[in-house]
Image: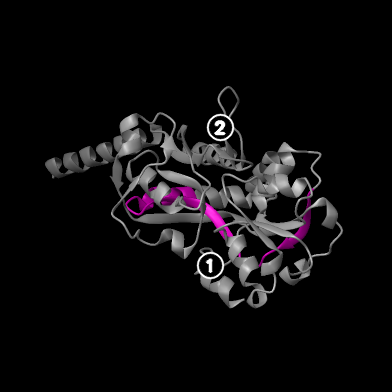
Amino acid sequence: MRCRLAALGLAAMLTSLATTARAADPLSICLDEDRPPLSVHHRGKPDAGFDVLLAQAIADRLGRPLKIQWFESKLDEDSSPQLEANALLSDRRCSFVGGYALTTDSLVAPGMKTARLPDFAGATRDDRRRRVALGVLAPSAPYVYSPMTIVLGPKARDRKIGDIGDLAGLQLAIESGSLGDAVLMNFDKGRLIDSITHLVPGRDDLLGALDRGEYDATLIDLARFDAHRTAHPDTAITASGYYYPIGANRGYVGLANDPALIEAVNKALGELAAEGKIAEYGKQAGLTYLPPREPAILGDVWKQIMQR
């Protein structure tokens, strides 16, 4: 009996030590270094953004220091946020990637076994060359709703927009391969096609061209408009107030092999939301904060767009 009690006591002590050791480990979160107002990391300036504030609050709730692994996501037609996030997680660069769009497409098992890492802070030449064996992704609860919105240029600032059809007669600009591109091109069997100019993501300045009056309207992620408005307080472009009805929640994504940590983060998110803290962080960062909506994970986005 004494041996059994001693064994149980030793097991409890080891469990306690393991829990304490883990609590002292940093909560590592990967964030895009240039996605204002969600996350911003510029040399010589303090880190900023909604996801930075939220990550720190969650780490505090868990009693762990925060470690942010900054990475750079390319805005082009060949980039894959899903593979970039999976590679970072599978390479143990972080436990979560923040600001991740929660859709069924973004959470399915990847069609390839390996992927290259995106450029990240501290990366070596070898890191940029090698490929990483990919794992299975698992989402947290959502913490913000991220819709697309119609933004109007100076010539169309007074146009009332209640639906995509209200864009008829305007000169439209859109980035090739984007969700907005699919929406506008497929609306009402292509009724707007002749009014659309396609720009190249990462090369052409969509919002700058709209600001200069070269085009009348575009359809973009709401956070991008927030970022432009913050960077250019005297901007001539305006929000229409219209949100496209198909939008995605954003949350954290980690690997499926650590459900306990995901559960702990979900608990912290629930507490922060109930206290109004998450909305407060959005306001501090200049983000038009919208709470998560059902469904938590958006279904086949492209199919839904084609059916409208």
Coordinates of residue 266 in the picture (x, y in percent): 49, 52
Q: Residues within 10 Å of mark 2 (few under 14, many from 20)?
A: some
Give the position of the C terminus as an image quadrant. bottom right
Q: Residue at x 17, y 39 (%)?
A: 6
Q: Determine whether 160 is above or below 234 in the image.
A: below
Residue at 60% over, 25% down: 45
Q: How far from the left and from the top, in percent, is residue 262?
A: 42, 51
* Residue that extends furthest to the top in the rendered view of this protein: 44
> Residue 199: x percent and y percent?
62, 53
Residue 301 badge: 1
Circle nearer the N terminus (1, 2): 2
Q: Is residue 106 above or below residue 227?
A: below
Q: Amino acid at mark 1?
A: Val
Quadrant of residue 51 within the rendered picture: top right
Residue tagged 2: 41
Q: Which residues are magenta?
A: 237-266
- Give the quarter of the figure containing the N terminus: top left
Task: Kindly give the residue lying farthest to the front in the view shown.
Answer: 194
For the residues labelled 1 and 2, the Cα–Cα distance comes to: 30 Å
Dot 2: what SS?
Answer: loop
